[in-house]
Amino acid sequence: MTSTIEIADVVKNVLRDAPLLATLSREERTALAAKAEVRHAARGERLFREGDLSREVLFVASGRIQCCHHCDGPREWVSAVIRPIGFVGLVDVVDGSARDGCAQALEATTVVSIPAADIAALIAGDHTFAAHVAKVLAQELRATQHMC
């Protein structure tokens, strides 16, 4: 069983170390921490499926998540493997669409879930954060184009 103190430390460490959140103030991080949820996923467990509503951005605290497309068909395309302090689900929050792929734990994994509405509010209200998010998404797009 995980104690409340250990959960608070996991959230604090992820919010402090995640590059996506680098431009946020201590107060903004504290506000996110108050709404964050820690979840544990077993190896092979799906964190979300293609078509699900986007309700959160997931930050990996430990373990690894595989992001893939066409998850329920005979073939799937792995678009990324997310490691600690990485994230998944931001694109869906930015454009408000349903999940366009799935996320599955490659091993026992702990994630910190930040509600989509809170990330969207930060993007809308903090121009520095919004510009940072745009830069991060552009870097991901370039990396994906390079893979193709």
Image: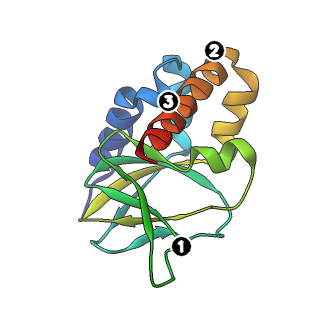
Residue that carries the numbered disc 2 in the rendered image: 128
SS label for mark 1: loop
Badge 1 density bin: few <14, some 14–19, many ≥20, Cα 10 Å: some
Q: Position of residue 7 (x, y in %)?
A: 33, 48
Task: Decide if residue 66 is on the left or right side of residue 74.
Answer: left
Please tell me which of labels 2 and 3 falls first in the chain: 2
Q: Is residue 36 above or below residue 71?
A: above
Residue that carries the numbered disc 1 in the rendered image: 70
Badge 3 density bin: few <14, some 14–19, many ≥20, Cα 10 Å: few
Please tell me which of labels 2 and 1 falls first in the chain: 1
Q: Are marks 2 and 3 in contact (CB under 8 Å)?
A: no
Q: Nearer the viewer, mark 2 or mark 1?
A: 1
| Rendered image quadrant of residue 135 | top right
Please tell me which of labels 1 and 3 falls first in the chain: 1
Count of numbered badges drawn on the protein = 3
For marks 2 and 1, give the CA distance.
35 Å
Q: Residue at x 66, y 24 (%)?
A: 130
Task: Decide if residue 1 is on the left or right side of residue 137.
Answer: left
SS label for mark 2: helix
Q: Position of residue 112 (x, y in %)?
A: 42, 49
Q: Position of residue 89 (x, y in %)?
A: 55, 50
49 vs 5, nearest the viewer: 49
Determine which of the numbered discs, if any, sits on residue 147 in the image: none
| Rendered image quadrant of residue 49 | bottom right
Residue that carries the numbered disc 3 in the rendered image: 139
For marks 2 and 3, give the CA distance.
17 Å
Q: Is residue 68 above or below residue 10?
A: below
Q: Are marks 2 and 1 in contact (CB under 8 Å)?
A: no
Q: Position of residue 108 (x, y in %)?
A: 24, 65
The amino acid type, in three-letter code, at marker 2 is Thr
Q: Residue at x 35, y 58 (%)?
A: 65
